[in-house]
Amino acid sequence: MTILVKSEDDVKCGVQTASPDRTQSRKRLRIESEEATATLGEDKKKLKLLKNPKIKDANAARLGLDEDTLAARLKPVGLDVYPVPMDQADASVPGSREFFSHHFGGAPQGTCRSSGKKFLKDHPEARRRDFISLKLTWNPHAPSIPGAPGLYFGAGAEDDWTEDMSPLSMLIFLGSSQWLYLGEYKMGKTAPLTTREWKAQSQLMKSTWTAQTVEGEESYHRHDRIGIHLRKQLGRKPTNEEFRAAAADKDNQFLTVTAKDVEHEYDVGNFQVNIWTMKCVGYDEEIQQTVLDKFDAFDAEIKAKRAEAKRLEKIAGKSKVKKEGRLKPKKEEQVEDLGPRKRPGASKKRKRSDEDSDTESDGSGEGERTHVVGGYTARPSTRNPRPNAVRKRP
């Protein structure tokens, strides 16, 4: 190695001066490190700008990845926002799922829905659209402002997504009956969460993902529970025959599987959370213009119909309560005190005492009035995007 000597004193003291090549190498590394740090700082600033201030979901913030991991996963699609060809105020006006379903087809529930054949037949002027509707509760890094990139935590059906598939019209949940159109999005597969990344997540996120497997009623939820049950019971991976035998018991939903059992499957890598990048590649102005032109009238009509239905239910409920109050006797009237029996041959009537007198009823029915609640409680949809369990099938 060539040593550059400054003086004889340096040689006597054992001081060695770095070679020009090493100096240049260190300088280059320092510059690259500074550039990487600056880039990371810029990326973090951009990430903050991608958040929608209208979404007040405190849980979503605790469900997500750390900033470094998030920036790395979004790197293939970049952090720039697609230029939306509408005024920002107009592009920020939400509609409801009922509204989008009514005007563009598809069911008002579920994650991925398309304009159905019947809708297209009844509306020949319409074209097929494929919608994806997300909540930050399940997808904390989904796009939340028009044109922004994001991540989708995948479900099993999305394994068939390909690079050449048509873009999806994206809706994001803002609040009760408020869904905002963000643009047309292409999906791209990226690396799933590693076991280390999974373990680093908050318990809230883990609970959110494990709950669907434990409580889900779909066939794939049962499939997951069967695998977990057999691995736990056998202490090994079940054979195809063992799995088929267990699945043949149709009455058994394998609900003994616990959230802790499911979390263990993620911890050891039997299950994985698949991740897809979401890149905005276009913006359908017709969709948002329809929201601007027609949603207010549509929403007012829906609210009026619901108010009228609620009023009629209330009247029906009061009528039922009043009817039951008339027909149903009070407790005191149900057991009548007839007093002591007459002795045979007694000719004189016994004077009734206060103790023998029947209890008077004021007809109010207090205490026994049945409170009838009008309306009903709708059963929540189980068709949420389930955590994708990439499992080693037997």
Image (cartoon, helix red, strand yellow):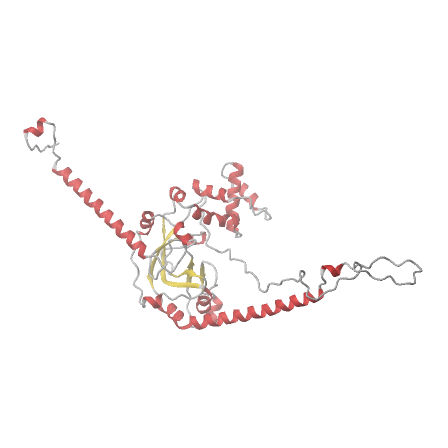
Considering every residue shown, the one lying at the far top of the view is 12
Answer with left or right where residue 27 lies relative to residue 178.
Answer: left
Q: Is 375 in front, or is 73?
A: 375
Residue at the outermost right position: 345
Q: Residue at x 22, y 44 (%)?
A: 33
User: Residue 58: image x %, image y %?
Assistant: 41, 53
Q: Is residue 55 left or right of residue 330?
A: left
Q: Residue at x 51, y 49 (%)?
A: 221
Name the spot of residue 216 as percent of width and height, x first.
52, 51
Tell me if I can see residue 77 in this picture.
no
Q: Quadrant of residue 254?
A: top right
In the picture, measured across the screen, residue 75 lies left or right of residue 208, that is left
Q: Could you tell me how many numbered marks the image carries?
A: 0
Q: Image point 39% across, 68% down: which residue?
A: 287
Residue 177 pos. (x, y %): 45, 64
Q: Nearer the viewer, residue 360 or 131?
A: 360
Residue 6 visible in the displayed image: yes
Residue 318 falls left or right of residue 87: right
- Please state the horizontal and vertical placement of residue 270, each as a whole percent of the image: 45, 42
Question: The N terminus lies in which quarter of the figure?
Answer: top left
* Above or below: residue 378 compared with residue 155: below
Q: Nearer the viewer, residue 317 or 394?
A: 317
Name the residue nearer the viewer: 125 or 152: 152
Tell me the residue at 39%/71% (across/down). Answer: 292
